[in-house]
Each structure stands twice: as C-alpha cells, then as structure tokens.
Amino acid sequence: MFDFLWNLGSFIVALGILITVHEYGHFWVARKCGVKVEKFSIGFGKAIWRKVGQDGTEYVVAMIPLGGFVKMLDERVEDVPADMLDQAFNRKTVWQRIAIVAAGPLANFIFAIVALYAMYLIGVPSIKPVIDSTKINSPAAVIQLSEPQQILAISGQDVRNWEEVNLALVGHIGSDSVDVTLAPLSRIEGVDVSGQTYQLDTRNWKFDPEKESPITALGLGIFRPGINPVIAAISENSSAQMAGLMIGDKIISINQQQYKDWNSFVDVVQTSANKTLTLVIERAGQQLPFEVVPQAQTNDNGDIIGIVGISPTAAQWPENMRFDLEYGMIDSVSAAVDKTWQLVVVSFKMIGKLFTGDVSVKNLSGPISIAQGAGASANYGLVYFLGFIALISVNLGIINLMPLPVLDGGHLLYYFIEVITGKPVPEKVQEIGFRFGAALLLMLMSVALFNDFARL
C-alpha cells in the first residue's frame, strides 16, 4: 500500500510539474502576443482550487491530473466583444499562432535542460561501463576478452556510464551493425591505452525490452563485483522465512556440498522445486542446519523452478570504477543541452521504429508505468528524479509535436499549410482531422494502458 501511495504521489508531482511547464509555455507566449487568456488550468474535471488574478485570468487546479489547458479568447469558440477583437487568438498572424502553439513543447525541452543542468551540478553516482565476458552465438561474440575492458564509445558516441551505453544502444535497434570501442581495464586505473573498435553484426539482433536490456541482449557480460553468501533480504511468506533463516546468516553448504558460488547455489535451488534441501548456516559464530523446501514457480519460459526467497549481499564496487558524473556551473549547461538533444534524437528514432516494426507496440507505456518510474526514481533520490522528469518532459514535448490534429503538432500542421497556401484550412476539414486525431490518440492510449496492466 505504501508503494502504491508513494508511486501515486511521485506521479502527481512529476506530471503536475511537466503539465504546468507545458501550459505555461503556451500562456507566456500568448500573453506576449497580446492574446487574452481566460483560463489557465492544471488538470481536468472539477476544480479543487481556483483564483482570478489581477490580469483577469482564472487559474485552476482540477481533480484529474492527466493534462491541462490554456483557454484563450477565440471567435471560433465564443462571441467576442468588438473592443476585444484584437486580443482574440484567431485574429493574430499565422506566425504568432505558430509561436503560441509551439511554445508548449519548446517549454518541455527547455525544462529538460534545466532539470539535467541541476542533475549534473549535484552529480550522478555512476559506475564505469566495464565488461568481463561476451556470450557465444551473439553479436558480441566477435569480441575476445583476456581481461575486463571498459566501453569507451558506441558507434563513435562517447559513453561514460551504463545509462549512456543503454541509451546509445537503444538508438541502434534495427540497424545492421553497431561499433563498440573498448579499452583494457588498465585505462581505468590511469594508464592511457588506446581503444579498439569492434563492429558487431546486429541484423538478427532481436530482444524483448520487457525481459532484458539491450546490453545483455547484445551479448555483453556486465562486470559485477563478487557476491557474498550472506543473506541480505528475505521475502515475506517465503520458504526461507518459514524455515527460520534470518538476515545476516552466512551460507556454508547445501545438501552436504560446500558453498562454491551464488550461481551454483541458485542452480541447485531452482532444480529442487518442492524438494527438501539441507542448508548449513553460520550464525553468531555457530553452524546450524536448516531444512528448506523451495516453492515451485513458473519462470518466463514456462518452466517450473524452485524459489526460496533470499537475496545475497553484493560486494562493494571497486573504487576505481565508481565516480560522480558532475560538471561545473558552465560545463553543466553544455552537458545538459547535449543530453537533451540525445534524448530527443533517440525518442524520434524509437517512434520511427514503431512504424517500421523494429520496436513492438508492446513497449508503449502509459500512466501506470510512468507512475512506477516516478516512484522508483524518487525513492533513489533527487538526482535520479530530476533525470526521470527530464526524460518524460522530452517525451511529452515530442508526443505533442506529432502531426495529430488534436495535439499541438496537428495545429502546427494546419498553420504551416496556411503559410504555404496563404489561406486557413477550412473549418470542416479541421473538424474531421480533430476527430481522426482523437480516435488515433485514444487507440494509442488504450494500447499503452493495456501494456501497463499486462506488466502488472
């Protein structure tokens, strides 16, 4: 219940900020162009707070936090007094109308830069992208490793942490090849070693983003610190809890076999569903025997496996692989602009790949997934929450630029046609377009919501 409330609260905060930014973009430019703004609303439905400002605009916060709007004086919507005609939106030049409509998505891009700027000023705790193996019969199998190596670049784009590697690889889904530049781990330790570039054949690179990351799907083995056989967490109502195991217990043996490594331990547990296992645990300097019966569970492949419900303690990352990705007051500006541009490019690429079929519509996410993401990022801290809302802000700006008549992009399409032809698009044509756009948008939202519930 707490997780639900936390995710909901984080979702409302994140979406409230982004909607306010978007609508304020429209509002600010409309006022600069001399348009009378009658209402500025954050949310839809019944108002839970309202105030009429000295400028005559009614400011509203409504109950449903899934959008907002700026209501401007417009002859196409209502009768306008003769003395206020010069303040009507429809009486403004086409370029002024374009500026007002484009200001919303532009405000989202600017906000993303501001959020990322703050994130880089604070500093993002990061891990250097180091691989220690490659998977056979995968695109990465052409890479032969004699020691752990750091990924320096993806197709010429420098990468500094795993988040940047992931973002760079996502942009290459559907490509015929991906270049990966590596350098030995000694480079991390301060020795200047030139990188070697490998070309990976990705023509048959297929994966499900719901089940794995593009990094592992490519066949790259992520370096991880060792795992200590000390229990760090125990699931509620699990076999381990019922058997009496406790956090801090150290695994000594399983079925009279000395503990070797975590993977071997997991293999024994998973192949022993509903079978009794004997564990020897060290607790407070004493070795104690416990009998545990792994609960049967079906994995993603439909196989029955055993689960005991414990997590081990991970060893600390080496200090030379940990760093804070941060910049000074000036450098943070260029870093934030560059990252925002990368997000814009990748987002447009992903939309294109939806139409080409390289990315499935199953990967569309709706408000439930966004809420979970907001809650998770907020739980990790302010710096991660800033990165999350920057990503969502960019996507909100791009979605609104799509040429669907019900969105900002659709209005811009009509106005650019007006620029070219010298006359407005007929009202009847616009109305048909709005209906089509609304139907298509509703269909996309339905697919996204269906995907959300399927993930749950």
Image: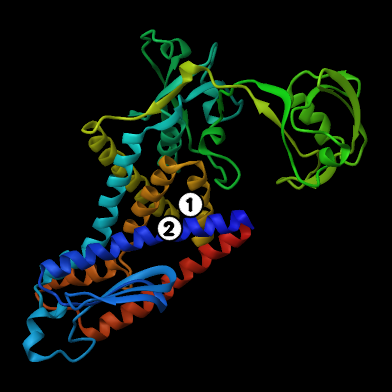
Residue 142 appearing in the image:
yes
In what element is the residue under mark 2?
helix
Q: How many other residues sit within 10 Å of disc 1, few (<14), some (14-19) or many (≥20)?
A: many
Viewport quadrant of the C terminus: bottom right
The image shows residue 396, relative to residue 63, as above or below, that is: above
Amino acid type, label 2:
Val
Q: Residue at x 17, y 86 (%)?
A: 75
Q: How many other residues sit within 10 Å of disc 2, few (<14), some (14-19) or many (≥20)?
A: some
Find the distance from the CA under tag 1 to the CA under tag 2: 9 Å
Instruction: Report the side of 377 relative to 349 (left or right).
Output: right
> Where, by quadrant of the figure, is residue 63 drawn?
bottom left
Q: Residue at x 48, y 38 (%)?
A: 203
Viewport quadrant of the N terminus: bottom right
> Where, by quadrant of the figure, is residue 14 drawn?
bottom left
Q: How is the image coloured?
A: rainbow
Q: Residue at x 56, y 33 (%)?
A: 216
In what element is the residue under mark 1?
helix
The answer to whether the residue labelled 1 contacts the one labelled 2, judged by CB atoms less than 8 Å apart, is yes
**Camera-nearest residue between 49 and 22:** 49
Q: Position of residue 382 (x, y in %)?
A: 42, 43
The image shows residue 239, relative to residue 427, as above or below, that is: above
Instruction: Report the side of 47 relative to 140 (left or right).
Output: left
**Residue at which label 1 appears:** 374
Image mark for residue 13: 2
Amino acid type, label 1:
Ala
Q: Position of residue 452 (x, y in %)?
A: 57, 60
Q: Position of residue 341 (x, y in %)?
A: 29, 43
Instruction: Report the side of 301 relative to 57 (left or right).
Output: right
**Camera-nearest residue between 15 and 200:** 15
Instruction: Report the side of 415 relative to 346 (left or right).
Output: left
The image shows residue 306, relative to residue 45, as above or below, that is: above
> Where, by quadrant of the figure, is residue 50 drawn?
bottom left
